Image: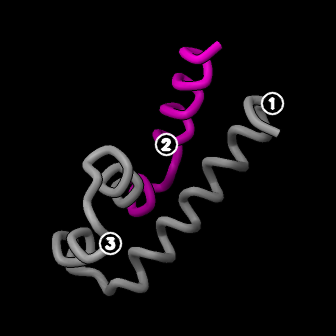
Amino acid sequence: EVSEKMKALEESIGMLPEPYRIIIILRHQQQLSYEEISDMLAVPLGTVKARIHRGRKMIVDFLSDRGIIS
């Protein structure tokens, strides 16, 4: 069950639009701070925060639609 959930999570990250996917990966897999991401991508800090928030929402919606989470 855990591996199924991990596969679904990886799939959901893969389906994100590129700007969201990159920031989610940098934040959660590379464990960079919002400020580090902002500097690295040369985007405003507010943009980083908004994309993380929206990206997480898209992931939750994807997993919820597939019955992985409720």
Look at the magenta stretch and give its main secondary structure. helix
For mark 2, does the 10 Å Cα neighbourhood hold few (<14), some (14 to 19), or many (20 or more) residues? many
Q: Nearer the viewer, residue 46 or 33?
A: 33
Could you tell me if the residues under marks 3 and 1 are in contact, i.e. CB atoms within 8 Å? no
Q: Residues within 10 Å of mark 1 (few under 14, many from 20)?
A: few
Q: Position of residue 6 (x, y in %)?
A: 53, 25
The residue where tag 1 is placed is: 67
Query: Compared to 48, does 10 lie above or below?
Result: above
- Report whether 33 appears left or right of 12: left
Magenta residues span: 1-21
Q: Please tell me which residue is depicted at 77% across the width and 31% down the height of the picture.
A: 66
| Residue wearing tag 2 | 13
Q: Which mark is residue 15?
A: none
State the separation of the CA atoms marked 3 and 1: 30 Å
- Alpha carbons under labels 2 and 3: distance apart: 18 Å
As shown in the figure, which amino acid type bears the numbered disc 1? Gly
Corner quadrant of residue 67: top right
- The amino acid on which the numbered mark 3 sits, given as a three-letter code, is Tyr
Q: Residue at x 69, y 43 (%)?
A: 62
Disc with the residue nearer the chain's start (3 vs 1): 3
Residue identified by numbered label 3? 34
* Helix, strand or loop for disc 2: helix
